[in-house]
Amino acid sequence: MVISSHPVVQSAPYEQNQDLTSPNRNLTPLGTALDDHHRLVVGGCTLSELARTYGTPLYVLDEATLRGTCRAYRQALAEHYPGPSLAVYASKANSSVALSALVASEGLGLDAVSAGELLTALRGGMPAERIVLHGNNKSKDELALAAGHGVTVVADNWRDLELLAELAPGLEGPVNLMLRFTPGIECHTHEYIRTGHLDSKFGFDPDQLETVLRHLQSCSWARLTGLHAHIGSQIFELQPHRDLAGVMADALALARSLGHPVSDLNVGGGLGIRYVASDDPPSIQQWVQTVAEAVVEACAARGLELPRLLCEPGRSLVATAGVTLYTVGSCKPIPGIRTYLSVDGGMSDNPRPITYQSQYTAVLADRPTAAATDTVTVAGKHCESGDVLLKDVTLPPAVPGDVLAVFATGAYNASMGSNYNRIPRPAAVLVGGGVAELVQRREQPEELLRYDVLPAHLAPIT
Ligand SMILES: *Cc1c(COP(=O)(O)O)cnc(C)c1O
């Protein structure tokens, strides 16, 4: 379905001083504006009209911002890295057929961590040779699916290698393999999203790397094409990424010295984004430049031919493009304590606040510039006291029916969502040039019963 919203007179940009070349540094999608009624406009569509047309909660994704981040990565890699390169979208951040197709059309690759994400990417037309399969506990079926399509498998542990060896006789050619190892690098981010330190479930321990590389010398079914490491997520520091280059170049030297013609160095993702005004992440250009220069330097110091440089941005590629719309419902003022303003979604469409104590920024979609005189806590509708989307934020006085717009929800919202309390999943629309297109249909309550099976002895007597 395609709808055109009313012609919009963009009287003013909404967010001043937007960084047009690195959208991860903005709070709002590129070109966010106010219409002639001072209502918020994204991608040329008035948000409250989208809410009326599609219902709420609604995920809105801005196409220009998505393409802007893809191009920022590609251009920065081309500018700062003298060898070949590929930016690979970490699709766990937001996996859909439409996003896979969009990212494929921008020339990026894609990282999947399950059969579901892999099938989604393939359906979106992502070429198999640009897909990598990750995961610390891949099933044999997932490995067979990936290897059968010619997808590169990132071996995370011995079990992956055992299962692939079992599958190999049934495959047409060798499996393209990358090895993931734990680089032993600490960074400052939430404990749950740190992956580079030694105490991590992901990847081979660095002490085992040589043993694995020697083992692979005798595995004719495997073609070792690359090495991979990922240090964590929502990282604002650049130094850990610089340090990673040295650790990976050492591993590359070792692998090549053992006769593996390793061409790819995959440094993972992790660049942070702005969720609240005080966040100040590096730009995509700064991040890429840092990584690229560090890899070039580390390879030069070891006399290594430059590898193809792969990176795997997830959050910084899609988060800022997303805005979630909710409808305001009940309000509970507790004198002297706080005022709860409840919306029609919550932890089932955005589990980040309850999981990581994440902060967000929100405005009323039709009065984004009105004086924010009330301090409220925006609560979801789930039966969980911790189901709070925004704690103690300021908003203009809100009434039931107002549309609340929460920014920077394009990553790790829809993809981490659930049906808790049997709440259906929201719809998602892609907006651009004043047109909105449905990319994810709204789930209906009856659809939630699809997988329920009633044993005969429990069947109601009619
Ligand atoms: C999560 C993850 C990413 C993406 O991380 P972001 O912080 O979203 O950029 C990339 N690679 C791997 C292996 C991951 O697990």
Image (tube, rainbow, N blue to C red):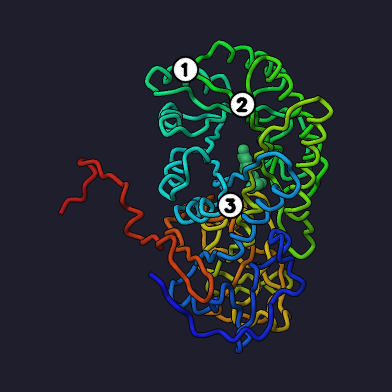
Instruction: Judge whether 370 appears above or below 260 on screen.
Output: below
Q: Position of residue 27 (x, y in %)?
A: 70, 65
Mark 3, residue position? 412
- Label 1 to label 2: alpha-carbon separation: 15 Å
Q: Secondary structure at mark 1?
A: helix
Mark 1 surroundings: few (<14), some (14-19) or many (≥20) residues within 10 A: some
In front here: 339 or 29?
A: 29
The disc, 1 or 3, on the residue closer to the chain's N-terminal end is 1
Is 191 on the left or on the right of 92, as rendered?
right
Question: Which residue carries the number 1 mark?
Answer: 165
Q: Is residue 25 above or below residue 126?
A: below
Amino acid identity at mark 2: Leu
Query: In the image, residue 139 lies at what x, y percent?
Result: 45, 29
Task: Estimate the spatial distance between the alpha carbons at disc 3 and disc 2, rounded to whole Å.
Answer: 25 Å
Residue occupying the far left of the picture: 462
> 310 and 442: which one is in front?
310
Identify which residue is drawn at 74% across, 50% down.
79
Give the quadrant of ligand 1: top right
Ligand 1 under 8 Å from disc 3 Cβ: yes
Q: Is residue 70 above or below residue 53?
A: above
Pinpoint residue 147: horizontal percent, then vertical percent. Answer: 45, 29
Residue displayed at 56% across by 66% down:
62
Q: Residues within 10 Å of mark 3 (few under 14, many from 20)?
A: many
Residue ID at (77%, 59%): 279
Indicate if the residue with disc 1 has its beta carbon within 8 Å of ligand 1: no
The residue tagged with tag 2: helix, strand or loop?
A: strand
Checking the image for residue 179, the label placed there is 2
Give the residue type that dot 1 points to: Ala
> Where is residue 116 drawn, in percent x and y?
44, 42
Residue ID at (55%, 57%)? 347
